[in-house]
Amino acid sequence: MGKSTPGKQKTVRLSEEELKELCQKAVEDGVSKYITVQNQKKRQEWRGLLFRTKKLLENYTKLKDYAEQAVVTLEQAEEVDETLVNMDVLMKFKLFEDDKTLHRQLRGVNAVKFIMAHVDRMLEVYKSNCLNSSQEVMHRRWFVIEYMYLEREDAKKTTKEIAEIYQTDISNIQKDAKEARNDLTTLFFGLDAMVLYEIRD
């Protein structure tokens, strides 16, 4: 019996058919892994949008107050502090044109006003959809959002309190809140959210 020569590797010969099968399997595995990674990224994006929706709702009344009460004009500033009555003179000398803090503040206020106008419009759309639905659960879903997020701080209700109002389990109210946030995420963020919603789980 012959001895194998040290240092030599065994050569494996594949037929053309076997080579094709190996290549095909490698391609399929690569595509499958790519799709998996992309879906994971999209799920993460969806969770990011959902988080933003929840934060918008949780801070709804604060953001509304900010958008409505923030000072963005000289006239508004003078209403708050009468000693600023001569600010228009300073403005004429362009002393504020290079003030980065002032410009950031103005951009921030305008951004919040814009966002809240959109949020309010979409909440009206959602309210109309829910209250015009023939399904009782959709009616409840709107009021869950209203009670939990849109009321003033002293009037907001917990899931337990809402469950008592509707004489149902807390889990049903929690599910309502979750589904409503899903729906509102789509309304708040449009087409991007619609695409991501399909593979959210």
Image: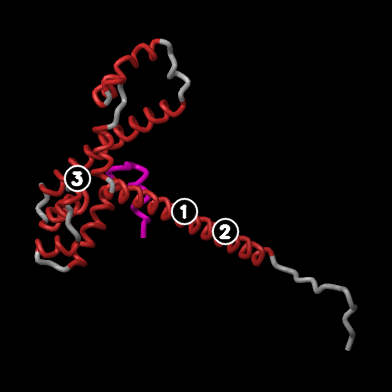
Instruction: Tell me, for residue 148, which label it has, or none.
Output: none
Instruction: State the residue position of label 1.
Output: 41
Residue 55 or 88: which is nearer the viewer?
88
Give the residues in magenta.
Answer: 187-201
Nearer-N-terminus badge (2/3): 2
Dot 1 amino acid type: Lys
Asked which secondary structure carries label 1, the reply is helix
Asked which secondary structure carries label 2, the reply is helix
Q: Which residue sits at x=29%, y=24%?
A: 77
Q: Is 198 one of the magenta-colored residues? A: yes
Q: Are marks 3 and 1 in contact (CB under 8 Å)?
A: no
Task: Give how far apart the Cα atoms at labels 3 and 1 are.
Answer: 28 Å
Q: Residues within 10 Å of mark 2 (few under 14, many from 20)?
A: few
Instruction: Tell me, for residue 126, which label it has, or none.
Output: 3
Instruction: State the residue position of label 2.
Output: 30
Dot 2 amino acid type: Gly
Q: Which residue sits at x=44%, y=18%?
A: 97
